[in-house]
Image (tube, rainbow, N blue to C red):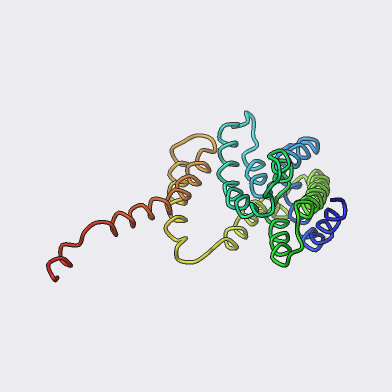
Amino acid sequence: MIEEMRKGAAANLPVGASVAAYGSVLGMLAAQKGLTWLQLLAMNLSVFAGSAQFVMVEMWAPPLPVVEMTLAVLIINMRYLLIGASLNPLFRGKSLAHKAAIMHLVADENWAVTMAAYRSGGATTGFLLGGGLCLCSVWSMGTLLGHQLGALVSQPERFALDFAFVAVFTALTVSMWRGKSDIVPWITAAVLAVVAERWLPGKWYIVIGGIGGALTPALQTVFQSRNRSQPNPGRETNR
């Protein structure tokens, strides 16, 4: 197990640099929002999901919108349902406690590295865990460095740090584009978010836009299935 963890950690070191850099941006934003390093560390260890943590930091304002924040994190992390399902062959025969402990440290990066290694016959749950521990460590170090730098900057707008949240999520959005099938869900999410931001208080627009965008493909599939199942009178006449 220890040897497998070491292999997993080593395999994830190349992506660790980008993870640390990404974390430093979160640290700077967290410092500007008034989070302490201990609060940020607790978030790293309990959530450990970069995009969800960026949303949490953006929503961080007294009084904390706990309900909206929780729902937003759940929506953003829904992709882990698919990630967990893809790891089923790796976890086959393992206990629920074993699965839960290791899945907590699964991120997009060590999942991708593990799946590549699994396809070549060289991955175990220990490999996955080692990668997760590696990434969690460099992520936490990156956020600490960013937090210290952010605390020293009194006017973040002078260095465009106030735009960091928008820039990060713009990059994430572009990287997630899959083609024309994303057009309707993305437009739906954007429209719902803009309307909700205009008429509802707090950060509900994040939750409403996320839910609307996520449900749109499912509704499209239902409508397409119904249309296919309905008889076509013209076709029957031609026959």
Task: Relative to 49, say whether 230 is above or below.
Answer: below
Q: Residue at x 60, y 42 (%)?
A: 73
How far across and how far down the image is residue 235, in percent? 18, 67
How far across and how far down the image is residue 121, in percent? 74, 64
Q: Residue at x 67, y 44 (%)?
A: 53
Task: Relative to 141, say whether 170 is above or below.
Answer: below
Q: Residue 214 versus residue 226: which sits nearer the camera?
A: 226
Q: Is residue 53 left or right of residue 181?
A: right
How far across and how far down the image is residue 34, in percent? 73, 37
Task: Relative to 57, say whether 126 is above or below.
Answer: below
Q: Classify residue 117 by image quadrant.
A: bottom right
Q: Is residue 101 left or right of residue 175?
A: right
How far across and how far down the image is residue 37, in percent? 80, 38
Q: Is residue 32 left or right of residue 65?
A: right
Residue at the front extreme, as displayed = 93
Q: Residue at x 65, y 51 (%)?
A: 165
Q: Classify residue 42 by image quadrant.
A: top right
Asked if residue 161 can be seen in this view, the reply is yes
Q: Classify residue 124 by image quadrant.
A: bottom right
Q: Residue 125 versus residue 27: which sits nearer the camera?
A: 125
